[in-house]
Structure formats: structure tokens, C-alpha cells
Image (tube, rainbow, N blue to C red):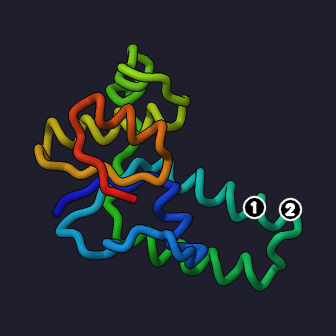
């Protein structure tokens, strides 16, 4: 299985949530946008600033995040992805989600025609399905 993983999937694995994607690590190749680096680190910082996590929690989570990111091939944010994300989408979609979908669409066209889209965001999954992606059941 080849898959595109959005930030929501990485964060649930990072937090050790019971509803995290059960197939984590069981792929041949996993991709995501370099956007996950920003989104996940913003989450860590928010947990610290809102005092949900102390310094030790943030340090452990940061270390875990670096390990998780090593197993995902990250695709750089390019002009082609910006153009795709800015184009009309078949459903309502938020900006960062559009970037993830545009990135996955580019990967599917160029490298992996059977790319599975993995997200915990139902609206994002709806958009991905509307574009012909199979989505992991969460």
C-alpha cells in the first residue's frame, strides 16, 4: 500500500490516541506535504503555550515527531501545488487541507496511481473522495 498522510494522522499517532490509524507503518511508501512539519510543530507549541503539556512532554513529543517524520517522504511546497490548491475544488475545503489534497493529487498523477488518502478530517476525506481517491476508513 502507498499512502498520503495528512497531519491529523501524524498527530493522533504522536498523542497515542486509541483512534489513531491502525495501519500506521504498514505501507510500502508514505507521502505527505512538508506542511506537516509546520502543522505538527504548531500543535506542539500550542500544547505548551496553553499549558496542556509541560517542557518534558513537549521534549518527548518533539523527539517522537522527528522519528515519525523520518518514515514519511515529504513533498516540497511548489508553484504547481499552489496552483492546484488555488483551483476550484469539488467540495468545500479549508486552505491547508486543499494544499494536502493538491499535493496528494500531484503524487498520484506522477508516481503512485493507487495512492490511498489517509486523514481523520471528514471534510477533507469528502473532498479527496470527490477527486477519486480511496480514503482509509477511520
Judge whether 53 appears above or below 84 on screen.
below
In three-dimensional space, the C-alpha distance between marks 1 and 2, rounded to whole angstroms, equals: 6 Å
Residue at 17% x, 69% y: name it.
Answer: 28
Q: Is residue 99 above or below residue 17?
A: above
* Image location (x, y in percent) of residue 75: 34, 48
Q: Residues within 10 Å of mark 2 (few under 14, many from 20)?
A: few
Report the number of discs. 2
Query: Is the residue marked by circle 1 packed among few (<14), some (14-19), or many (20+) residues within 10 Å?
Result: some
State the quadrant of the C terminus: bottom left
Q: Position of residue 91 (x, y in %)?
A: 42, 22
| Left or right, 77 with reference to 136 | right
Cβ–Cβ under 8 Å for marks 1 and 2 = yes
Answer with left or right where residue 111 lies relative to residue 4: left
107, 26: nearer the viewer: 26
Work out which quarter of the rendered image holds the N terminus and state it: bottom left
Lateral position of residue 4 relative to residue 51, left or right: left
Residue at coordinates 35% horizontally, 54% vertically from top-left? 118
Tag 1 secondary structure: helix
Residue 45 falls left or right of residue 1: right
Name the residue beneath numbered marker 2. 49
Could you tell me residue 58's position as x and y percent?
73, 76
Across and down, in percent, residue 52 comes to 83, 70
Q: Is residue 5 above or below residue 94?
A: below
Q: Which element type, helix, strand or loop, lies under badge 2?
A: helix
Q: Any mark on residue 130, and which?
A: none
What residue is disc 1 on? Answer: 45
Residue at screen point 24% across, 52% down:
116
Q: Residue at x 75, y 61 (%)?
A: 45
Residue lying furthest top: 88
Picture layout, residue 43 above or below residue 97: below
Amino acid at each position: 500500500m502507498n499512502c498520503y498522510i495528512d497531519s491529523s494522522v501524524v498527530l493522533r499517532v504522536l498523542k497515542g490516541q486509541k483512534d489513531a490509524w491502525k495501519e500506521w507503518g504498514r505501507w510500502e511508501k508514505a507521502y505527505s506535504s512538508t506542511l506537516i512539519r509546520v502543522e505538527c510543530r504548531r500543535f506542539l507549541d500550542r500544547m505548551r503555550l496553553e499549558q496542556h503539556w509541560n517542557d518534558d512532554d513537549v521534549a518527548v513529543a518533539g523527539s517522537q515527531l522527528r522519528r515519525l517524520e523520518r518514515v514519511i517522504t515529504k513533498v516540497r511546497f511548489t508553484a504547481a501545488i499552489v496552483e492546484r490548491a488555488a483551483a476550484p475544488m469539488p467540495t468545500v475545503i479549508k486552505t491547508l487541507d486543499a494544499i494536502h489534497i493538491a499535493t496528494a493529487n500531484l503524487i498520484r498523477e506522477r508516481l503512485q496511481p493507487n495512492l490511498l488518502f489517509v486523514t481523520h478530517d471528514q471534510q477533507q476525506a469528502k473532498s479527496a473522495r470527490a477527486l477519486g481517491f480511496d480514503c482509509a476508513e477511520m
